[in-house]
Image: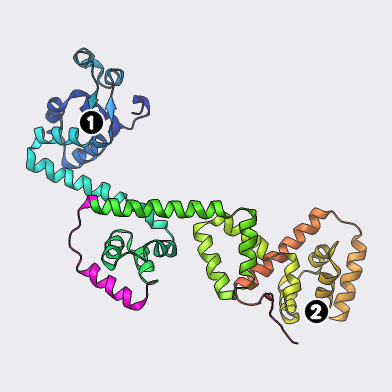
Amino acid sequence: MKHIDEMTGTERAAALLVALGPERASDILKHLDEKSIETITVEIAKIGRLDPEEKDDLIGDFILSIKRNSGSLEAGKESAREILEKAFGADKSSQILKKLSAKDFEKEFDFFKDADPEILFMLIQKESPQMTAVILSYIPPAVSAAVLKLFPAKTTKEIAVRMAHLDSVAQEAVLDLVGRLKDKYEQYVENVKKGFGTEGIASLVEIMNYMTDDDEKKLMKNLDGALPDISKNIREKIISFETVNNLTNNDMRILIDEVNNDQLIAAALKGSDDDIRFKFLRNMSRNRATDLLENMDKMGAIRKADAEDSRKEIVRVIRFLYESGVIHIQKPGEIYVE
């Protein structure tokens, strides 16, 4: 349990009621409004054990009576029930506890608010329609709807019908079912992270080179949600300064116009391969290309870091144009004629 100085007022009140014992606590609760009772009872249910030192800190003036009991006091839901029953009777206490239980039950599903629907679909697609209906009925509606869309039309209809006619399911059963799904989800994400070492990322980039633009973007979107750090790493490898060699002349002209900064291009071309220099120069007018070369000569030697920064800015523009669908990056095996 927290030290008394670290407790909120509600946590301290709950702990004090537990320390006082059910009889005294019930007398105190009778004088509180229902909202306060509900708030304090939630905290009572969270308390595990109180040792004698904690009791001393909590109740001060009652230290003598607390010291008569040298054992620990058990708390949790049973303590909450006992206190409430003494204060309000069995029926009223059951109503309050059910309300509290429902709130705790809902919290179990907060995890799925930010879950990737495609990963969830992969994990439950082989479950029976009835089981899938139960799962989708309890996870957040927006996520549930996104998962449902991924099933074939026939299966979607069957699951939707079962959801509409779903009978009440025991909370314990639902918590067990969704708890196992949560464990699978976390394990899957962890395994994916472990699998994406340096070699794994290189292999994925190689595979993506053979994907269509749409499939590649879809995959990257999924990785953005599930594994943002890895997604950033992959993006940096998919598109680099050397990517200009995989652009058509028309796309190069679009890139040059979008960059619209010959000083930046000149700095980026310092120390670059002849192929990359030629790619830029051949897609400029003769006068502009001549001016660019003269500009590079006037610059003389520049810091490698400055050249790298200029290249990063051009890569940023390439990525923007590619992800916007304005330009296409040529894949291995693709042949273009101009």
Circle 2 is placed at which residue position? 283
**x, y percentage for residue 288?**
85, 76
Amino acid type shown at disc 2: Asn
Q: What stretch is highlighted in magenta?
A: 151-172
Q: Report the quarter where the C terminus lies.
A: bottom right
Viewer-side residue, 38 vs 182: 182
> Magenta: predominant secondary structure element?
helix
Whether residue 227 is in magenta: the answer is: no
Viewer-side residue, 157 vs 271: 157
Side of 134 relative to 167 (left or right): right
Q: Please tell me which of labels 2 and 1 falls first in the chain.
A: 1
Which quarter of the figure has residue 80?
A: top left
**x, y percentage for residue 72?**
24, 22
Q: Residue at x 64, y 56 (%)?
A: 199
**x, y percentage for residue 263?**
82, 66
Amino acid type shown at disc 1: Ala
Circle 1 is placed at which residue position? 75
Q: Which residue is drawn at 71% across and 78% down?
A: 251
Which quarter of the figure has residue 115?
A: bottom left
**x, y percentage for residue 71?**
23, 18
